[in-house]
Amino acid sequence: MKKRRYFRFSTLYQAVLLILMYVPILVVIVYSFNVSKNTTVWGGWTLDWYRKMAKNRGLLEALKNSLVLALLSSGAAGIIGTLGAVGMARIQWKSKAAIEYISTLPIMIPEIILGMVFMAFFAMLGLPFGMVTLVLGHTTFCVPYVFMMVKASLVGIDRSLGEAAKDLGASERRAFFDITLPLIAPAVASGMLLAFAMSLDDVVISIFVTGARTNTLPIRIYTQLKSGVTPEINALCTIMLVVTFLLVGLSRLLGSKGRR
């Protein structure tokens, strides 16, 4: 009897949680096809808002900046995170656990604090705020995603494979590129895709480290929301949701292949 009650309560709890999480997303998607400009009144189906969004030069420029930023930051994070995970797997220091914990701190610290720290640090260095500071800031919080993915993948790799390659005359560099890298490639790709999605979605840190002439898509959406939500914004959010879900799904697929 207790098990039945527990089962019913857990099922009800999960259902309520899923409704609260996904119903607002569904509302945004549905109202992106709304004829009426009033987002609280349904007037019929249309694709006009997607057409208007495609002709908006400001939105397209912001989208271009966001894509460039996400590509650069995820690429840099892929290199740094991979090298860091491989290096940490080879050392046996007593402080290894502490270093690994510190390496994942950027995703644990609240974004508003991290953004303020970046702003103060870049101002102290005298760096002009813009794409350079955006790439540096995004790379910092993207590295842990790649680091954790590659670190988990390295646990399942037989070290004797690399040792056998060295015994056959391969150098340390050759053994890494011919043996280790192909084995961890799915984890690296999975981490980079996840980092790409996180960078494309970020708004808090970007606000602190961007310049007046550099605008990203999330920042532009945020500033437009102050003057009221329009179906054009809903259309843009729908496209971003689809792209984010695809990237996260591809990331999980590559991660599962890497674990197998």
Image (tube, rainbow, N blue to C red):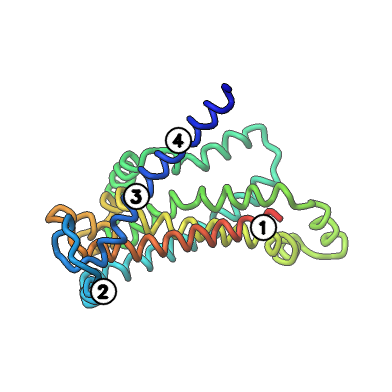
Q: Residue at x 33, y 39 (%)?
A: 113
Mark 3 or mark 4, which is nearer to you?
4
Taking the spot 82% from the left edge, 60% from the top edge, the residue there is: 166
For numbered disc 2, what is the local secondary structure? loop
Q: Amino acid at mark 3?
A: Val
Q: Earlier in the sequence, mark 3 or mark 2?
A: 3
Quadrant position of the N terminus in the picture: top right
Answer left or right for 64 relative to 2: left
The image position of residue 24, as x and y in percent, is 31, 50
Q: Which tag, 2 or 4, sits closer to the chain's start?
A: 4
Residue identified by numbered label 4: 12
Viewer-proximal residue among 185 and 82 = 185
Q: Earlier in the sequence, mark 4 or mark 1?
A: 4
For the residue pair 165 and 232, the one nearer the viewer reads as: 232
Residue type at mark 1 is Gly
Q: Disc 3 and disc 2: Cα gap in Å?
A: 21 Å
Give the SS element for disc 4.
Answer: helix
Residue at the left extreme of this rendering: 227
Q: Which of the two discs, 4 and 1, sits closer to the camera?
A: 4
Residue located beneath label 1 in the image: 258
Q: Residues within 10 Å of mark 3 (few under 14, many from 20)?
A: few
Q: Earlier in the sequence, mark 1 or mark 2?
A: 2
Tell me: 43 left or right of 238: left
* Place of residue 27 in the rendered image (x, y in percent of width and height, measured from the top left): 29, 55
Please report contact status of discs 3 and 4: CB closer than 8 Å, yes or no. no
Q: Which residue is mark 3?
A: 23
Q: Tell me how far mark 2 sits from mark 4, CA to CA.
A: 37 Å
| Mark with earlier residue (3, 4) | 4
**Amino acid type, residue under disc 4 in the picture:** Leu
Q: Quadrant of the C terminus?
A: bottom right
The residue to which callout 2 is attached is 47
User: Distance of mark 4 from mark 1, alpha carbons?
Assistant: 35 Å
